């Protein structure tokens, strides 16, 4: 006999279809920091609301888009880049995974993320999710990690 599905799936992140309430100050601070510094690391325990703060209606990505930044989207949802899904045999598996997350494989005359960004400098806002996968997915592949960070 098959067990019924667990009705308690845990917290789910808000998406662009959901309105973000009560986080205006955090979004404003994060947006100001990102504009000033260009690279920001947002970290907290799992389930704390990082993805919701980014993706929800009124969250960071919608505010940045409203300010004229090019925020990658697919099917009406903001795209967060994952780096851990590349194939083990690829020389830069993390870069390949980022390209796949953005649906950039085979787009234009580029073969890597850095070539794409250099070729079409549009001011894209790139957000990496689960970035720790660079060190956890294939911990002994130092070459791929080095290539990714050099890029």
Image: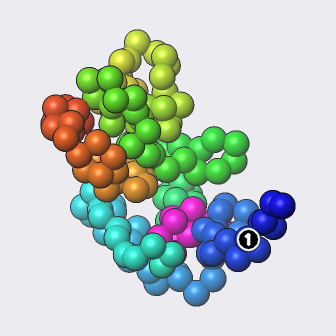
Q: Residue at x 31, y 56 (%)?
A: 132
Screen quadrant of the N terminus: bottom right
Q: Is residue 48 visible?
A: yes
Screen quadrant of the C terminus: top left
> On the rendered structure, is 4 left or right of 65?
right
- The quadrant holding residue 15 is bottom right
* 122 in the magenta segment: no
* 16 over 19 or under it: above or below: above
Q: Residue at x 48, y 22 (%)?
A: 105
* Position in image of residue 92 (x %, y %): 28, 28
Which residue range is magenta in the image? 49-59
Q: For the residue labelled by badge 1, is the local secondary structure a helix, a strand or a loop?
A: loop
Q: Residues within 10 Å of mark 1 (few under 14, many from 20)?
A: few
* Position in image of residue 32 (x %, y %): 35, 70
Q: State the residue lying farthest toward the front.
A: 1
Q: Residue at x 43, y 55 (%)?
A: 129
Type of colouring: rainbow
Q: What number of labels is visible?
A: 1
* 86 over 4 or under it: above or below: above
* Position in image of residue 124 (x %, y %): 43, 42
* Position in image of residue 57 (x %, y %): 65, 67
> On the rendered structure, is 19 left or right of 72?
right
Task: Work out whether residue 66 or residue 144 is closer to the camera in this orientation and state it.
Answer: 144
Residue, disc 1: 6
> On the rendered structure, is 44 left or right of 21?
left
* 98 over 139 or under it: above or below: above
Q: Is residue 113 visible?
A: no
Q: Residue at x 51, y 75 (%)?
A: 47
Q: State the residue lying farthest toward the bottom.
A: 22
Task: Work out whether residue 12 or residue 70 is closer to the camera in this orientation and state it.
Answer: 12
> On the rendered structure, is 86 left or right of 9?
left
């Amino acid at each position: 006999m098959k067990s019924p599905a667990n009705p308690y799936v845990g917290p789910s992140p808000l998406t662009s279809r959901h309105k973000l309430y009560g986080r205006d100050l955090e979004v404003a601070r994060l947006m100001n920091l990102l504009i000033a510094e260009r690279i920001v690391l947002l970290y907290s325990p799992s389930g704390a609301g990082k993805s919701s703060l980014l993706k929800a209606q009124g969250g960071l990505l919608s505010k940045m888009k409203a300010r004229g930044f090019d925020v990658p989207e697919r099917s009406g949802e903001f795209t967060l880049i994952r780096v851990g899904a590349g194939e083990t045999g690829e020389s830069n598996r993390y870069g390949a995974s980022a390209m796949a997350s953005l649906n950039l494989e085979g787009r234009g005359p580029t073969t890597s993320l850095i070539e794409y960004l250099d070729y079409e400098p549009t001011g894209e806002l790139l957000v990496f999710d689960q970035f720790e996968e660079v060190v956890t997915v294939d911990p002994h592949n130092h070459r791929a990690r080095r290539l990714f960070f050099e890029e």
